[in-house]
Amino acid sequence: MVGYTVGQRVREIGIRMALGAQPGGVVLMVVRQSAVTLSIGLAVGLATSFLLAWIFATRLTDVLVGVKVTSPIPFVATTLLLAVIGLLASYIPARRAAKVNPIVALHYE
């Protein structure tokens, strides 16, 4: 998704680079924008998983024998793992966007 978004914004990124934007600033811009989307997704997913864990703990106690679904360690570990993977996945298109030649980007489309 981030790669597609960056591909759609090649012209804008080229203009920024032509006006003097540093490659590090372009990388930071793309990663920051994808981090906002990532954090919203993680928050919704975490809230949903807490709700489902509560439902399982209260309604399906005979299915989950010996398992504590209210333990925070799996929730925190999974959230951190997904956050790291999401940020790494957004860094690759961001780095590619920072290497865009402004002349080529302005002729894009």
Image (cartoon, helix red, strand yellow):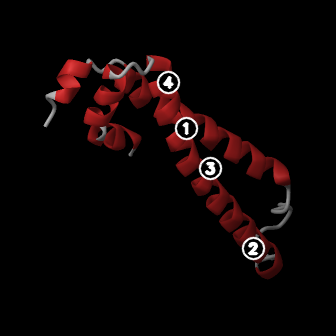
Quadrant occupied by the C terminus: top left
Camera-nearest residue between 28 and 83? 28
Report the amino acid beneath label 3: Ser
Please, is residue 3 above or below residue 17 in the view? below
Q: Which residue is mark 4?
A: 25
Residue at the disc numbered 1: 32
Check disc 4: other Cα within 10 Å, few if <14, some if 14-19, many if 20+: some
Say which quarter of the image contains residue 93: top left
Q: Residue at (81%, 62%) from the top-left corner?
A: 69
**Cα distance, mark 4 to mark 1?**
10 Å
The amino acid at mark 2 is Phe
**CA gap, disc 2 to disc 1?**
35 Å
Secondary structure state at the residue bearing disc 4 = helix
Q: Nearer the viewer, mark 2 or mark 4?
A: 4
Position of residue 14 measured from the top left corner of the image (x, y, whole percent): 29, 27
| Vertical position of residue 97 compared to residue 22: above or below | below
First in sequence: mark 4 vs mark 3? 4
The percent position of residue 23, horizontal first and vertical second, equals 44, 18
> Judging from the image, what secondary structure is the residue with disc 2 in?
helix
Tag 2 residue: 56
10 Å neighbourhood of mark 1: few (<14), some, or many (≥20)? some
Query: Does residue 59 appear left or right of residue 102 in this picture?
Result: right
Q: Earlier in the sequence, mark 2 or mark 1?
A: 1
Q: Which mark is residue 69?
A: none
The alpha-carbon separation of the residues under discs 2 and 4 comes to 45 Å
Discs 2, 3 touching: Cβ within 8 Å: no
- Residue linked to disc 3: 39
Q: Cα distance, mark 3 to mark 1?
A: 10 Å
Answer with mark 2 or mark 4, whichever residue precedes in sequence: 4
